[in-house]
Image (cartoon, helix red, strand yellow):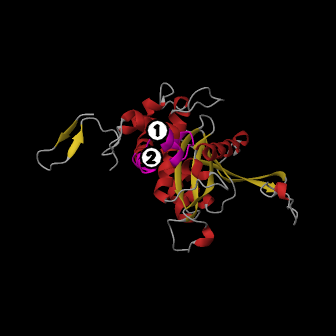
Amino acid sequence: MQRCRCRECGRTFSESQPLEDLRIPDDKAIQIVHLLTEGVGVRASGRPTGCDPHTVLAVLEIFGEKCAAFLDHRLCGLTVGSLQIDEKWSKVGVSRSRTTPDDQERGDFYTFLGLDPQTRLIVSHHTGKRDCENTDTFVADVASRIASRVQITKDGWASYPDTIRHHLLERLDYAVIQKNYDTPPAEIEASRRYSPAPFVGVTINVKAGAPRRDRICTSHIELANLSVRTFTGRFTRLCLGWSGKLANHGHAVAMFVAAHSFVKLHSTLGTTPAVAAGLADHPWTVTEFFWAVSEYRVT
């Protein structure tokens, strides 16, 4: 790759540098992005590509920031009939028991997702503590991306009703679906230690508007949660793949959401969510995805 030197400051640069100042061949960078979007860990991605783990982390950081800018630009003015919202737990750095209430960079974190069940498009995402402030930030982002009236289905997290009504009241149909489980026995055998209690039914409460009964469901967002845990190793439970830094965790989530929408075919749709939502005219290859995202500059 041809490199040039600036006559004023003396810094060197290349004519083609999709990942800012990271000096890595394009094919290596594309291969690393492909592995990371398939759920391969940082060290495991470095072995087949012949790259140091620090190089893989640099690709994750730069490309993840570009993915966030790309999603901010492409996912706006959406027409969404219904939306399912949920959040999933992950650990950053250390367990919650080893942190203090003032530690905002480590411990338990939740990734909020808003999914369109018709197109399987992840309309919005946000990672933070499971509190009112982060809930408000996430719902405000959802409201800024949707231009139509929307029906929202959510579980029983107490911070949502007031926040959702505040940001979307004039164009909102909102229902809460609460899953009910049987009381687990005091002594659970080892083979069922991590299994949920027996499911006995659901309770539906209408919070705003007149939601359609056939759209009150959270099954699609629960399936999306499974996809996140499958293709993002940082969410895998009882393993060593958790994030060491909150920033890298956010980059990995942004990369997953972008690849999920524009690259990965959905078995039910037969195409990508972006094509189903009219945001792309064909499913992208990883190479097309890499170059499209690389054009965005992080400010």
Q: Is residue 201 magenta?
A: no
- Label 1's element? helix
Residue 143 seen by the camera: no
10 Å crowding of disc 2: few (<14), some (14-19), many (20+) = many
Label tally: 2
- What residue is pinned by disc 2? 56
Q: Position of residue 138 (x, y in %)?
A: 52, 55
Residue type at tag 1: Thr
- Label 2's element? helix
Q: Residue at x 41, y 38 (%)?
A: 29
Residues at circles 2 and 1 in contact by the CB criterion of under 8 Å: yes
Residue 204 seen by the camera: yes
Q: Quadrant of residue 139?
A: bottom right
Residue type at tag 2: Val
- What residue is pinned by disc 1? 49
As measured in the structure, the alpha-carbon distance from the residue carrying label 2 to the one carrying label 1 is 9 Å
Q: Residue at x 60, y 37 (%)?
A: 120
Q: Which one is in front, 224 or 189? A: 189
Q: Position of residue 212 (x, y in %)?
A: 69, 41
Q: Quadrant of the N terminus?
A: top left
Q: Which residues are magenta?
A: 36-62
Q: Which one is in front, 141 or 206? A: 141
185 vs 28, left or right, is right
144 vs 154, left or right, is left
Q: Residue at x 54, y 63 (%)?
A: 93
